[in-house]
Amino acid sequence: MPDHLEFPRPLRLLGTVSWSLIESAGLPIGALAVAAWLYGRDAGLLAGLGATWLTALIRKIATGSVPSLLTITALVLTLQTVMVLATGQLWIYLLQFPAANLVMCVLFARTALGPHPLVARLAAEVVALRHPANHPGLHRFFQGATWLWSGIFLLLTAGLGILMVTEPVKVFVFLSTIVTVGLTAAGIGVSTLWFWSVLRRFGLRLRFAAA
């Protein structure tokens, strides 16, 4: 069994990560911003959603599959857009934030015990990580990390839900940003330390792929 994991070489890794972020976040945000500036909020939301699903369709036609990060973006943005456009009530608008995190919680949880945990798929697609196939230690790590992120999104759902019903709008937006950034940073830190401990335990090494 190979004793190493591979990342693409630095420039290629940068390109892979950049393109993943562009197609899953940059394109919809750009379309949303331009359309909202020209025609208003609702047009912006529809433009961002349209850009996301169009990118997913092109990916499906060109490669036969849609990256997990792009799929997640499409599902969450669809939910948020429907909720915002369905009614003008403020509480419905605010509900999109905990609802989006609940969707993320379910998406991660439903793959955690399967053969392809979502964290492993994101690692392969976003940073092109290659690792020994069917390595039991790594598989358990990816399953555990997927459960970890499902739990983080569940905490965000509960936390934002409580803030939504207890705080004024401006305070909710401020505190929800702090809570989201804080829990996300904590999740990244725990996942990284856990990953390195797994590598050391099984004698695995990280290296860049050959040119």
Image: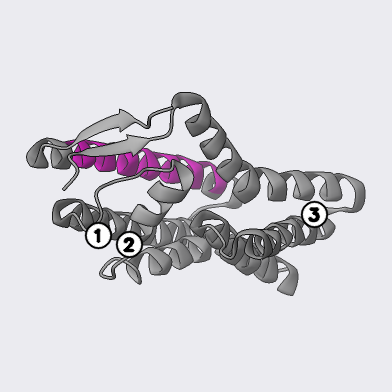
* Amino acid bearing label 3: Gly
At 68% from the left and 71% from the top, the residue drawn is 82
Q: Is residue 123 left or right of residue 171?
A: left
Q: Is residue 116 left or right of residue 96?
A: left
User: Which element is circle 1 on?
Assistant: helix
Q: Is residue 150 left or right of residue 199?
A: right
131 to 189, vertically: above or below: below
Marks 2/1: CA distance? 6 Å
User: Which element is circle 3 on?
Assistant: helix
Count of numbered badges drawn on the protein: 3
- For disc 3, the marked residue is 44
Marks 3/1: CA distance? 37 Å
Mark 2 or 1, nearer chain start: 2
- Which image quarter: residue 200? top left
- For disc 1, the marked residue is 143
Range shown magenta = 173-196
Mark 3 or 1, nearer chain start: 3
Residue 132, position in %: x, y? 24, 49
- For disc 2, the marked residue is 117
